[in-house]
């Protein structure tokens, strides 16, 4: 049988740059689509995150809290097509809500695709309320791989390759 080609990749940030300083398009998109991002933060007391930390595989962004993020001009509509969003993360605190992958429009309306709940489990609100939530307790200072997929009318949440939750027939909002 013929091999099934992989789906197209919209954006892929390896985060292998030596350092970030807030320069536009400094976080390189390796997908070939030039959807580069900029390391930034908001708030009264913050500085641009750097990549001085070792990651699970190579280097990684050291984001010190919810005020730190990557900003991209790319606009992706999760309701328009099937997708997979994935991230490696290592929480230092598992008792507060932490967005891992989120999307926000220019006026502040958005959704979080992957997050850690205040009860220390993986969650997503991409399918609206109620949230799609995992059950495995997360531990501080431990590496995890999280993924969220949409295939047809099914949204699934994965932690370390194991399915944590699945909802079918819910509109992506």
Image (cartoon, rainbow, N blue to C red):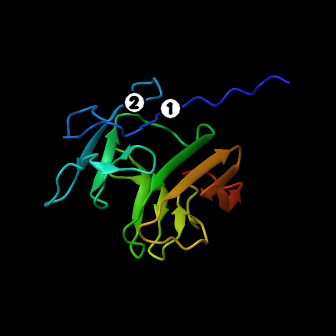
Could you say which disc has been placed on residue 74 in the image?
A: none
Secondary structure state at the residue bearing disc 1: loop
Element on which disc 2 rests: loop
Q: Mark 1 or 2 closer to N-term?
A: 1
Residue 91, above or below 127: below
Residue at screen point 36% across, 38% down? 16
Residue 129: image x %, image y %? Answer: 56, 65
Examine the rendered structure and indicate whether residue 126 appears above or below residue 81.
below
Q: Could you tell me residue 103's position as x and y percent?
A: 42, 48
Question: What residue is rendered at 27% in x and 33% in y?
Answer: 26
Give the alpha-carbon distance from disc 1 to disc 2, as whole Å.
8 Å
Residue 172: percent from left, percent from top: 59, 50
Q: Which residue is mark 2?
A: 35
**Outermost residue, left side:** 44
Residue 171 vertical placement versus 116 (above, below): above
- Front-lying residue, 166 or 136: 136
Residue 106 in view in this figure: no
Looking at the rendering, in which quadrant would you find the N terminus?
top right
Q: What residue sits right under mark 1 in the picture? A: 10
Image side of residue 56 versus residue 167, left or right: left
Q: Position of residue 4 (x, y in %)?
A: 74, 28
Marks 1,2: beta carbons within 8 A: yes
Q: Residues within 10 Å of mark 2 (few under 14, many from 20)?
A: some
Q: Quadrant of residue 7?
A: top right
Is 86 displayed left or right of 70 in the figure? right
- The extreme right residue here reads 1
* Relative depth, front residue between 57 and 22: 57
């Amino acid at each position: 049988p013929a091999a099934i080609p992989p789906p197209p990749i919209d954006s892929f940030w390896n985060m292998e740059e030596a350092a970030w300083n807030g320069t536009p398009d400094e976080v390189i998109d390796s997908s070939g689509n030039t959807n580069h991002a900029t390391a930034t933060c908001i708030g009264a007391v913050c500085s641009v995150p750097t990549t001085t930390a070792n990651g699970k595989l190579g280097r990684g962004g050291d984001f010190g809290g919810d005020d730190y993020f990557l900003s991209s001009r790319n606009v992706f509509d999760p309701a328009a097509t099937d997708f997979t969003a994935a991230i490696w993360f290592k929480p230092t605190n598992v008792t507060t809500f932490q967005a891992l992958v989120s999307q926000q429009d220019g006026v502040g309306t958005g959704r979080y695709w992957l997050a850690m709940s205040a009860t220390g489990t993986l969650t997503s609100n991409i399918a609206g309320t109620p949230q799609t939530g995992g059950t495995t307790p997360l531990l501080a200072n431990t590496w995890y791989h999280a993924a969220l997929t949409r295939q047809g009318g099914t949204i699934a949440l994965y932690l370390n390759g194991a399915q944590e939750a699945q909802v079918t027939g819910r509109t992506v909002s």
